[in-house]
Amino acid sequence: MEESLNIKDMTEFQQELYALTTKYMRRDQPSSLYMCCGVMLKTVVQMYVSVISEETIEKILLEAVKSIPMLKENMDKSFAETTYH
């Protein structure tokens, strides 16, 4: 039960992040997406630095890099299932 609550919380948090970043993204300025992503990544690293070692942060980031193909595949599937009107 605890795990499903965590997944629910993570999903809700992620949706809130998407909603927040949408306020700062401009369709005519792709760099606005890069800015949002860069600021979030910088903030994540700053938060990690405050509580764990640099070595551990590097391990976390390396695992994140390994997950890129899976995340891309999931995003591609998500976009393929989206209906545009």
Image (cartoon, rainbow, N blue to C red):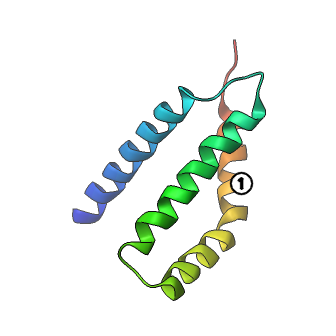
Q: Residues within 10 Å of mark 1 (few under 14, many from 20)?
A: few
Viewer-closest of 42 and 59? 42
Task: Using the rendered view, name the quadrant where residue 50 is placed.
Answer: bottom left
Horizontal side of 72 relative to 38 (left or right) equals right
Residue furthest out toward the left: 1
Question: What residue is pinned by disc 1?
Answer: 72
Depicted 40 relative to depicted 18: above or below: below
Can you give x and y, in whole percent of width and height, for residue 19 in the image?
47, 31
Horizontal side of 24 relative to 12 (left or right) equals right
- Viewport quadrant of the C terminus: top right
Viewer-closest of 53 and 72? 53
Can you give x and y, in whole percent of width and height, for residue 18 in the image?
51, 37
Depicted 42 relative to depicted 33: above or below: below
Task: Using the rendered view, name the quadrant where residue 60 is placed.
Answer: bottom right
- Label 1, secondary structure: give it: helix
Task: Using the rendered view, name the quadrant where residue 7 is placed.
Answer: bottom left
Depicted 28 relative to depicted 56: above or below: above
Q: Tell me what residue is drawn at x 35 percent, y 76 percent.
A: 51
Residue furthest out toward the top: 85
Q: Tell me what residue is drawn at x 59 percent, y 73 percent.
A: 61
Viewer-closest of 15 and 74? 15
Horizontal side of 6 relative to 53 (left or right) equals left
Q: Tell me what residue is drawn at x 67 percent, y 22 percent.
A: 83
- Viewport quadrant of the N terminus: bottom left
Q: Amino acid at mark 1?
A: Lys
